[in-house]
Image (tube, coloured by chain):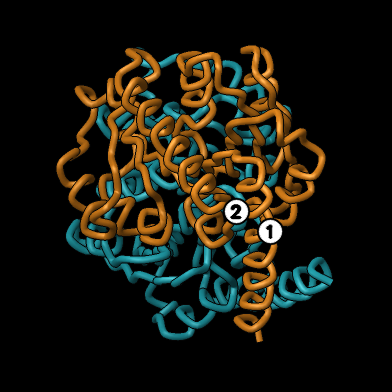
Chain colours: A orange, B cyan
Amino acid sequence: MKIQIEEKILSENDKLALENRKLLAQHKVYSFNIISSPGSGKTSILETFLTELPKHHRVFVLIGDVQTENDAMRIIKAGYKARQIITGGACHLTAKVIGRHLNELDLHELDMLVIENVGNLVCPAAYDLGEDDKVVVLSVTEGEDKPLKYPSIFSKASLMLLHKIDLLPYLKFDKQKAIECAKALNPHLHIIETSCFSGQGFKEFIAWISSRLQEKRARVKNKGD
Amino acid sequence: MKIQIEEKILSENDKLALENRKLLAQHKVYSFNIISSPGSGKTSILETFLTELPKHHRVFVLIGDVQTENDAMRIIKAGYKARQIITGGACHLTAKVIGRHLNELDLHELDMLVIENVGNLVCPAAYDLGEDDKVVVLSVTEGEDKPLKYPSIFSKASLMLLHKIDLLPYLKFDKQKAIECAKALNPHLHIIETSCFSGQGFKEFIAWISSRLQEKRARVKNKGD
């Protein structure tokens, strides 16, 4: 019974995610969904990412949290367009709630939609939002076996940021093992080591996102021809 | 509809949690449920806690994870009794699954049951397992506003471990703000600063748990008189 209900909710979510995906493609908007544990550094990553991103990119950020508007306020204070989605009790965003916001945004004035999911490695992996890429953040202050413990998100992500890499000297974290665990689940996973303190990895992160955005535009254009 | 289903599942869980609580009281077993984000250090905390706990305490550890038996193996290797509960897709433990294990354990041979929940700050807070205390772990590598973002667990916990405190010099973490956020939600919350590297706080943690165990025994005894 419980499984049937979950399956029904998930297949309903998939339909709405498909609608979001079509709408974003229509407007040539590239989107990524950033997922991690609470406190892995998603919002700080977005602050640094947005600051270093070439200014011609027009970006909007949707941020999910169980409570508080703190994260959207951080992004807005940094000078970027953002909106907070307070989920109340829910531990993940859904395609339905993202769809509602897409209908309110001027998509023809955007190049990129960034979605920061609720801090959680389990449920956000099960809910497709219509994004182009899932970006998973693993902070080196967490265990190196996280990919094995939370295989779904590490299998579905296109990019993994191995974050807070500046703290490595103070930790017993086996970086090679973390990378091997992630690659064993997902051989195509691209991995970038990042730090908001030193700025390490952000040039590569921005180059990766920019190339995905260009690929999407080319894909959408060819389809439209 | 969704809310109704959730309410039904939760009230069913509450009934089973009450049964677990009665069963543990009958056998004078004290229990705590340790909850945090993935990678905050729950298993390392339990390793240090068990090593430093006076040996006359008879302890069993139940460990929830979405996948892998890694954490139970760590506790067993350290010489303690433990069992892994693999939840598959579920992002939290339930009273039902804990009840199933309670029925299989020799409760009359135990003083303490430790439950390590799935790494998640959202759903584990909603599911009472029949434990005496919830212990929430906040690592200083996470943000100081976590209590405000995840108010449910910080409101329901009796004890908060402010963990990885040895990393404080390398971080921009406002310790006072974190403590104020937590106390604003829950003025009775007891807070201990801990580190597995230096061993800081573990004497106090063990003293706190031991006094809760003694209090429970006294309570159960008085009721039985």
Residue on which disc 1 sits: A19
Q: Is residue A155 visible?
A: yes
Residue on which disc 2 sits: A130
Name the element at disc 1. helix
Chain of residue at mark 1: A
Q: Quadrant of residue A2?
A: bottom right
Chain of residue at mark 2: A
Quarter occupied by the N terminus of chain B: bottom right
Q: Which three-letter amino acid code belongs to the residue tagged 1?
A: Glu
Above or below A25: residue A83 = above
Direction from residue A80 to residue B161 in the image, left or right: left
Q: In the rendering, at what x and y percent does residue A99 appear?
A: 74, 51
Direction from residue B143 to residue A70 in the image, left or right: right
Q: Residues within 10 Å of mark 2 (few under 14, many from 20)?
A: many
Q: Residue at x 20, y 35 (%)?
A: A172
Residue positioned most to the front: A225
Instruction: Mark 2 and mark 1 in contact? Answer it, CB < 8 Å.
Output: yes
Q: In the rendering, at what x and y percent does residue B30 appear?
A: 51, 61
Name the element at disc 2. loop
Q: Nearer the viewer, residue A123 or B14?
A: A123
Q: Which three-letter amino acid code belongs to the residue tagged 2?
A: Gly
- In the picture, the disc for residue B107 is none
Q: Is residue B182 visible?
A: no
Quarter occupied by the C terminus of chain B: bottom right
How far apart are the alpha carbons under marks 2 and 1? 7 Å
Q: Nearer the viewer, residue A164 or A25?
A: A25
Direction from residue A101 to residue A63 in the image, left or right: left
Q: Residue at x 61, y 23 (%)?
A: A58
